[in-house]
Image (cartoon, rainbow, N blue to C red):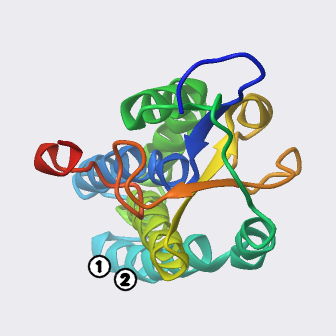
Amino acid sequence: MRAGSGGQGLARVAVVVRAGAAPLWWLGVFAAGIGALVPGPAGRRIGVTAGAALFLVALAVVAYVRRGRYRELARPAVRAGRHDVLQDRAVSMRTWRRRHRWWLLLAFLAALGSAFAVPVAGGLLLAGCGVGLWLKASWIGRLEQAGGILLWVRVDWLSGGAGSPAGKTVKGYRTTGIAAGDATPGGARRRASALT
């Protein structure tokens, strides 16, 4: 399924979801580490306690929100055509991160700024969002494995707005066999031995 007339560029749904997980996690950990050095008025103990609660709330919300929408889009998914172009995992990751770099920077700066009021909390909130995305991608992977398929979304539907694979611009998914592409169910990198 490579380039040809009438084909669509397709990105893996789980890969797009997973793309923000690592940046949010590491930026959150970094912001929390810096925040621990800032003597905010709330104090470190309160900051860590509040941050742990925010971490768990963010994790749960990000991991579970819009699952119904993903199922709704996956249910009527049609088979990818012969001329559809399957986007590499690295390209999908790079594209998402490039489009969201300013949002990631603003989130990091906000987490740092919050440390002057409540140390550590903002960073842990950001890290919780990252873990939530990993869990959501893993859930999508289980959905894919249960159906024996991989879910793909048209690249042009991700070009505007937040670029979410469950956003308003997305009308449906396409599917391939479980071995297509260079990412496993859930969006992790497929081992080189599995590609040969």
Quarter holding residue 32: bottom left
Q: In percent of the image, x 81 and y 68: which residue is there? A: 76
Q: Is residue 11 above or below residue 168?
A: above
Q: Nearer the viewer, residue 69 or 51?
A: 69
Q: In percent of the image, x 76 and y 73: which residue is there? A: 75
12 left or right of 9 in image = left
Q: Which residue is mark 1?
A: 45
Tag 1: residue type?
A: Arg
1 left or right of 167 in image = left
Q: Specify few, some or many for label 2: CA neighbours under 10 Å numbering under 14, 14-19, or 20 or more.
A: some
Quarter holding residue 179: bottom left
Q: In percent of the image, x 69 and y 76: which residue is there? A: 67
Quadrant housing the N terminus:
top right
Q: Which residue is mark 2?
A: 49
Q: Position of residue 123 (x, y in %)?
A: 39, 57
Q: Position of residue 62 (x, y in %)?
A: 58, 70
